[in-house]
Amino acid sequence: MVKLILRDKEYQVKPGMTLLSALEKIDILPEAVIATREGEMILEDEILKDGDVVKLVAVISGG
Amino acid sequence: MKCKKCGSKAVVNMRQHKLALCKEDYLEWVPEQAERFIKKYRMFSHADKILVAVSGGKDSLSLWEILVRLGYQADGLYIGLGIDGGFGYSSESHRLAARFAEERGLTLHIVDVEAEYGESIPVISEISQRGRGKPCAVCGLTKRHVMNRIARDRGYDVLATGHNLDDEAAVLFGNTLRWSGEFLRRQGPVLAEMPGMARKVKPLCRFYEREMTAYALLRGIEYIYEECPFAEGSTSIYYKEVLNKLENNRPGAKLTFYLSFLEARERGLFTEAGEVRQELHPCTNCGQPTTAPGLCSFCRMIDKVHGEIEIP
């Protein structure tokens, strides 16, 4: 499985899909996050592999 | 996806520009673009002394880093708001801003609201009963006052803030929903200097918030990631989410919304009604401009706070 982490929430998706599909599946707008894997930024067309841990950095701030 | 410049693996894809870039090219592209916007909107020159308002967040620290990288004379101003939120929000943002300045040998002015005005932002908000239980209105009023005071008193030519395109588009969206003519007339990359008021500029106003986050991450700038505890559920965040949904389906929608507004304003769309201009008076206490003769909103608020403390 692939694990996606956004702040204190964790999501799991099946491997083999693109990051874009994974974000759509867990209902997160690609515009609102930046994805990193092993400290490197990855783009929406990246195919996620079994065991991948993707950290999502929220980009929206208010105030 | 490949970098459009060098063909290596891209790490940032800006659909609104149809441009994907690798780390090295992106870190060059952002300052180049910032310089282009600074010149296009005639924000300042290399001869000017710039005061950058830094919150410890990604935008303001990145702005400071970019201005210094471009060779501008830029000092920082950090305003301690006294907001805790259970995780020391203000103390952590202060630590990050101070560390950023120290590591680069930059000058950072620090104003602690509680030390200077007697109470923290949440307490001032409670006493003054402004903002319906949220201190955001008090916070904005205080920050605008302090930023202007320091810029003026310390002889800076211009005050720069880290507002990005998403910030500007969200404000524009709110002002458009209400057709707030006066606010629409005033919104823009540059707010001209007037008696008692420093010139204000927003060099990041054409960068998406996502782009600034990418810049801070790729440049290795440590910023406060946690949101201000009072920002949760705020209207500005809601507007940003709405605009991002639009952007997701129509890449470039946010940029077009903002740039078309600037062009419309330039063409005079808002000027006819704008001929009725509000007269401004200097505040009798601090000298900053205010719409009614006497004390400005900030000085009235602080007077009330002091009154409440002295008379239990």
Image (cartoon, coloured by chain):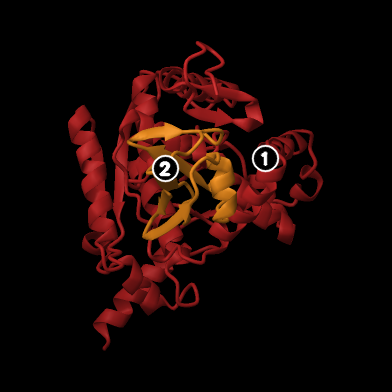
Chain colours: A orange, B red
Q: Secondary structure at mark 2?
A: loop
Query: Which numbered disc, 2 or 1, marks the residue closer to the eye?
Result: 2
User: In the figure, B72 relative to B141: above or below?
Assistant: above
Q: Position of residue B63 (x, y in %)?
A: 40, 33
Considering depth in this image, is B199 or A41 the residue closer to the camera?
A: A41
Q: Secondary structure at mark 1?
A: helix
- Residue bearing the label numbered 1: B258
On screen, residue B272 versus residue B284, left or right, reads: right
Find the residue positioned furthest to the top: B6
User: In which image quadrant can residue B15 be found?
Assistant: top right
Single out the residue that lies furthest toward the bottom: B312
Q: Which mark is residue A7?
A: none
Is residue B1 or residue B303 the one in the foreground?
Answer: B1
Residue B214 appears at what percent x and percent y? 44, 34
Letter of the chain that mark 1 sits on in the rendering: B
Q: State the image coordinates of residue A32 (x, y, percent, origin top left).
A: 53, 48
Hey, what amino acid is under mark 2?
A: Asp
Q: CA distance from mark 2 to mark 1?
A: 41 Å
Dot 2 and dot 1 within a common chain:
no
Q: Which residue is mark 2?
A: A50
Decide: few, some or many residues near mark 1? Use Cα within 10 Å; few <14, some 14-19, many ≥20: many
Image height check: is B27 above or below B269?
above
Which of the chains bears the disc numbered 2?
Answer: A
- Residue B157 visible, this orientation: no
Question: Mark 1 and mark 2 in contact (Cβ < 8 Å)?
Answer: no
| B284 and A39: which is toward the camera | A39
Q: Residue at x 24, y 36 (%)?
A: B100
Quick check: B52 left or right of A13? left
Q: Which image quarter is the C terminus of chain B in? A: bottom left
Q: Is residue B14 above or below residue B40?
A: below
